[in-house]
Amino acid sequence: MDLFTFTLQTGEVSVAFSPEPSVTAFGPEGGIYVVDKHTEPLLRRCAGFDPKAPLVSLEPGEDHKSLDSIQKILTAALDASLGRDSLFIGFGGGVITDMAAFAASLYMRGARLELVPTTLLSMVDAAIGGKTGIDFGNAKNCVGTFYPASLIRVSVSYLASLSEAEFRSGLAEVMKTALLYAPKLFQIMQERREHILSRDPDLMLEVVKRCVQAKARVVERDLKESGERMYLNLGHTFGHALESVAGFGRVSHGDAVAWGIGRALNLGLRLGITDPEYLTDVLPVLESYGWCTAPVHPALSGGDRSRELLAAMKNDKKKKGGAVRFILQREMNSTLAQTVSDEDVLAVLS
Ligand code: GLY
């Protein structure tokens, strides 16, 4: 097994990379598995799985990222008489890892936590860095805690079973990480597209490792998003607005984020911040993965929707002092956050 370790203000985090999927066997203090109906069969085949241990299998999907699901997990833990020294294992995509971690952070004021991300997005982003949470009211992830797992087990063997949309959602986060922190990763995405799209296990292991290492460095410096961590939202302000205006589910998260990256770079260009040559390098790579780089995304129909997009951005939870701060780039590895006039935002949307 290949181990990467980083240190947060809350303690040490280990990321274990192994070809064979596995989970930690529960000790005498016991533990609980949190899965959804899709990941439960994968867990049951994992080395270390204990069929007699408590298991909560939730309905899959964002609609179930709710207090009701957290209540189910906490109730099952209490019914099994688990203590604070018991181990919560969250096994699934970002929805499951966020919820298992949230429940672990609440149970007895903080149980032990292991995460096993099974999607590309959760391997490179959601499971790394301690954000936990649920959706509440109409707002995504607006109730939660910072509670890093002490162990994250990564096996890229899970990637083979992902749907195209799920895989591409993760790839957009890989692209984001590359542009923010990892020129070598950008080069890999540029030069080895066929191998990436065919999910070559060796190459994907390298890609995931590079993303985990880059994100670990960010959260070591800024776990609670008081500064630099907000850069990880590159492309997300535009992307979330697109998902919301097009209607959730009509455009995948990854396609929306990738489009958002293109819009953010164009906004930077308009403001005289982004180097034109950088844009010329990045846009063809986005396009080569089939991502839209046009101002108007094809998921939007019915005339000029730019004002609706702007209104959706103003509802974004990442506002600071009531204003939306856009993540912009001068070039690769050189990022900033700033407020932008409505006029400039509208100009890159039509
Ligand atoms: N997914 C963004 C972050 O972890 O901060």
Image (cartoon, rainbow, N blue to C red):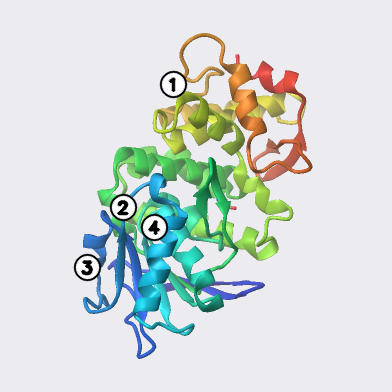
Furthest residue toward bottom: 28
The secondary element bearing badge 2 is classed as loop
Give the camera-side residue of 98 and 48: 98
For marks 1 and 3 on the same chain, the one whose residue lies earlier in the sequence: 3
Image-quadrant location for residue 71: bottom left
Give the camera-side residue of 274 and 298: 298
The secondary element bearing badge 1 is classed as loop
Residue wearing tag 1: 299
Assess whether mark 2 and mark 4 are in contact (beta carbons under 8 angstroms).
no
Residue type beneath disc 2: Glu
Residue type beneath disc 3: Arg
Residue wearing tag 2: 59
The secondary element bearing badge 3 is classed as helix
For marks 4 and 2 on the same chain, the one whose residue lies earlier in the sequence: 2
Residue wearing tag 4: 205
- The residue sitting at 56% across, 30% down in the picture is 241
For marks 4 and 1 on the same chain, the one whose residue lies earlier in the sequence: 4
For marks 4 and 3 on the same chain, the one whose residue lies earlier in the sequence: 3
Residue type beneath disc 4: Leu
Give the spatial CA distance, label 4 vs label 1: 32 Å
Classify 10 Å Cα crowding around label 3: few (below 14), some (14-19), many (20 and above): few
